[in-house]
Amino acid sequence: MRGVLHRYGTNLRLTERTPLLSLGEGSTPLVACRNLGGELGIELFAKYEGLNPTGSFKDRGMVLAVAKALEAGSRAVVCASTGNTSASAAAYAATAGIPCHVLLPAGKVALGKLAQALIYGAKVIAVRGNFDTALDLARDASRRLGLAIVNSVNPYRLRGQRSAAWEICDDLGDAPDWLAIPVGNAGNITAYWAGFVQYARSGKASRIPRMMGFQAEGASPMVRGEDVPQPETVATAIRIGRPVNARKARWAVRRSGGAFAAVSDPEILEAQRILASREGLFAEPASAAPLAGLLALARRNELPRGIRVVMVLTGNGLKDPDAALGKTPAITEIDGNWSSLEEVFRS
Ligand code: AN7
């Protein structure tokens, strides 16, 4: 299986000593969302990152970060995570054959992500506190114990994540007008922008998209312009109050003519349901923030007509079934005979 290192190695500063790890990450589908696009009056695509090996975009950068950690002789990796980074780190550490330590905000990680970290064999530590506290501790562990930190403070993470922007340009033949993306630690939006810039400079794209970053209202430091000490949102993946990549992301958004905006938890859950029921795409709540934002812009007549928009579905909906089940219709239970079933179809 050809992964990100095999396909984009020349762009990723590999050396002869970099192990070519792969779980088959990247090459995710760019799905045309004709139903919603038609309704919104735009050409809408979804970059379906939930189909990566561990179910999120994190795999693109994690494969490079862990490969580089091995190359540098690191004997273990550490990260803090709202869930997806830990799942990805644990999987790549497993294939690399080194231990992985993950620090999670206690009680605030979706069950599927927790199950992943555990089954891949990571040492899971629940921190009483939020993600920002856990990241401070992970940095301490890295510094004091010499573990390789594989959060997005590790430059290889964002470099690998650029590959998603390259794939979008390769699929569309050019960059889109807008990129709509959820923002937590503000790493991915920075990586996409850098990826688009790199492609534009090398003549493989004619433009750089407006970078449109969407946060949850209760965890929206990029929108408010200041840290949020107690971030809170149903979209636990982006429950982050002090984004480590804030400065770089602000630059990317300003340079591209984009913007940050916030959406409410009810808007996120409604967008998640609409995405699944209208397009057949099941993404986790954080990943529905961009669609929630586009729907809100359209309601206010602020969505330009006819533009080409790619929204990034960063994580798979199966990771967090609890969040999805809140708004689904009731299940009809019947006795196991035809007349009971016939009754259901008649009513
Ligand atoms: C599904 O796993 O920060 O703005 O520790 O899991 O680059 O942080 C997850 C982030 C969006 C935000 N969507 O990306 C972690 C973590 C999903 C995510 C984001 C995350 P960044």
Image (cartoon, grey):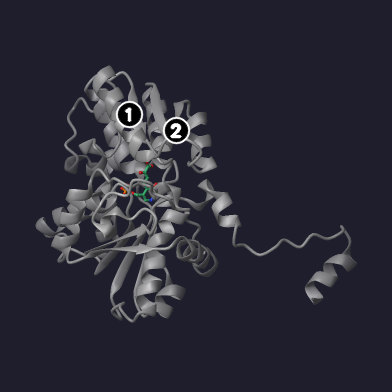
Q: Name the residue under label 2.
A: 128
Which residue appears farthest toward the front when viewing the image? 229
Q: State the residue in front, 269 or 14.
A: 269
Badge 1 residue CB within 8 Å of ligand 1: no
Tag count: 2
**What is the quadrant of the N terminus in the image?**
top left
The image quadrant that residue 5 belongs to is top left
What whole-number distance in Å separates the C-alpha atoms at marks 2 and 1?
12 Å
Residue 245, horizontal then vertical, whole percent: 23, 46
Residue 277, horizontal then vertical, whole percent: 55, 67
* Disc number lying in front (2 or 1): 2
Label 1 element class: helix
Q: State the residue in front, 103 or 187.
A: 103
Q: Give me the residue at 87% from left, 57% from top.
A: 336
Task: Kindly identify the amino acid type of the residue bearing the numbered disc 1.
Answer: Leu
Residue 20, visible in the rendered structure: no
Q: Name the residue under label 1.
A: 137
Residue 170, horizontal then vertical, whole percent: 26, 58
